[in-house]
Amino acid sequence: MDPLKQRCCESASAGDNGGVTSGATSRVTRNDVAAGARGTSGDSELSGASYDASGSPGANLPALRGHNAALVLGLLRAAGERGVSRLELAAATGLTPQAVSKITARLRADGLADEAGRRASTGGKPPTVLRLVPGARHAIGLHLERDELTAVLADLAGDPVAVRRAPLAFEDGADRVLTTVEREVAALRDGAGGPPVLGVGVACPGPLDHTAGVLHRVTGAPQWDGFPLRDALADRLGLPVVLDKDTNAAALGLAQGIRVRGTGEGVGADEHTGTEEAGGADDGRGLPPGSGSFAYLHLGTGLGAGLVLGGGLYRGRRTGAGEFGHQVVQLDGPECGCGKRGCIEALCLTAVVRGDLAEAARLLGVGAANLVELLDIDRVLLGGRTVLDHPEGFADGVARVLADHARIRGGSAVPVMLAPGGARAVADGAAQLVLAPLFGPRHPALAASREAVG
């Protein structure tokens, strides 16, 4: 089996679908080794071996071969078209030059990396530059909204190769949804052809258990409660599948620093199997500096949040974090689909329906201010269909509430911006549920290593 696809299978079964590191001391388990080593806080822990987490991210141990390859792959992806030399990889990872040479030889043999010329010499033999081959493998990201499916075929760099959209009736239950997904994934793969597909990331409304791959009582669609969506789709598609909430997937993609491409909307002639081919120049958009902790607020057919705290996606022990729309802000308010009264989702969507966008934005800002007060986040990102239909109104309205909050509390207002990625942010992030574990934790060591080797 393709080694990357095998790692996707092991990652899915371990529930390790796309963790991002906070840069804290690494805790490495057997599942982390298989899945590309997700970094979390805690002590070193690997049965039968020790792991030096004191500084260098690399580890010269046979048991951590998969971890080290993931680190190298991650640095190759971060380097982009400019590429990176073996000496720079060794300096950035703390691995020996011999270990780096062996890893890069395996990556080249698997078609994942290739030589791309030489650096200008600063004395001695000019170093050979290596680059990731993004098109060597693909991943699929699916966004299951309540009324629409978006499917993205992404390369190893996270850039979309092709995109499809189709109507979806999530409340109709499993059989019709699974049939639609199976048809659209087949059409996506047939249309693009090309390299092997590593796996499928699925993002849908919560609540759900991402580790077990099981949906819970989704608001407005209680018939999904207890349904094993991950395993059912894996059986239908014949591919590894990972599952998470839509807001978590989007936040993961943003935390991974996806540089968005081809955000223009183009739909084919058949509305039931509408096809959008992704292309166009990289617009260079990404999260600005100082975004280590942020909330992604998604307002579409529902309202939820994805939380990145200290650089790491925060799901909570039971994937319950981010149920932002069901915080009660009006006691004895209107009934919400979740069964409670006065939820911010019910109030906000009601304001949207009656055309009072200023009130909807104010309510969204109140919820955002609650998050800032509770978590001291650095930034608020807005996305989702309803926000994108009225981007300036929502961005300005939320920013005004946060500015008022800052004046009361003192200090500067937390900035608000539209999330990069537009309408495709969740589907792009869903592809990262597959890709992120393959590339290891993100380390800011590459620039420093280039300086160190001249």
Image (cartoon, rainbow, N blue to C red):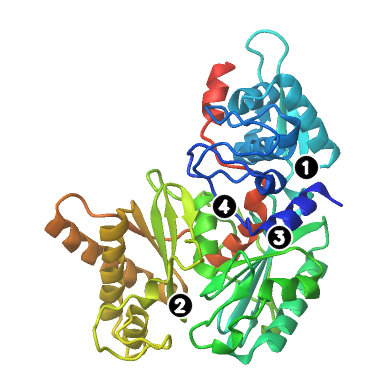
Please state which amino acid type lies under the numbered disc 2.
Gly
Circle 4 — which element?
Answer: loop
Circle 2 — which element?
Answer: loop
Residue underneath mark 3: 13
Q: Position of residue 299 (x, y in %)?
A: 42, 74
Q: Position of residue 186 (x, y in %)?
A: 79, 73
> How far apart are the two marked residues, 2 and 4, measured between alpha carbons?
25 Å
Give whichever of discs 2 and 4 has the lower sequence position.
Answer: 4
Circle 2 residues within 10 Å: few <14, some 14–19, many ≥20: some
Q: Nearer the viewer, mark 4 or mark 3?
A: 3
Q: Are marks 2 and 1 in contact (CB under 8 Å)?
A: no
Give whichever of discs 2 and 3 has the lower sequence position.
Answer: 3
Please state which amino acid type lies under the numbered disc 3.
Ser
Q: Residue furthest top?
A: 123
Q: Nearer the viewer, mark 2 or mark 3?
A: 3
Q: Is residue 49 left or right of residue 259?
A: right
Circle 4 residues within 10 Å: few <14, some 14–19, many ≥20: many
Residue underneath mark 2: 300
Q: Are marks 2 and 4 in contact (CB under 8 Å)?
A: no
Q: Quadrant of residue 11?
A: bottom right
Q: Is residue 319 left or right of residue 397?
A: right
Please state which amino acid type lies under the numbered disc 1.
Leu
Residue underneath mark 1: 112
Please state which amino acid type lies under the numbered disc 4.
Gly
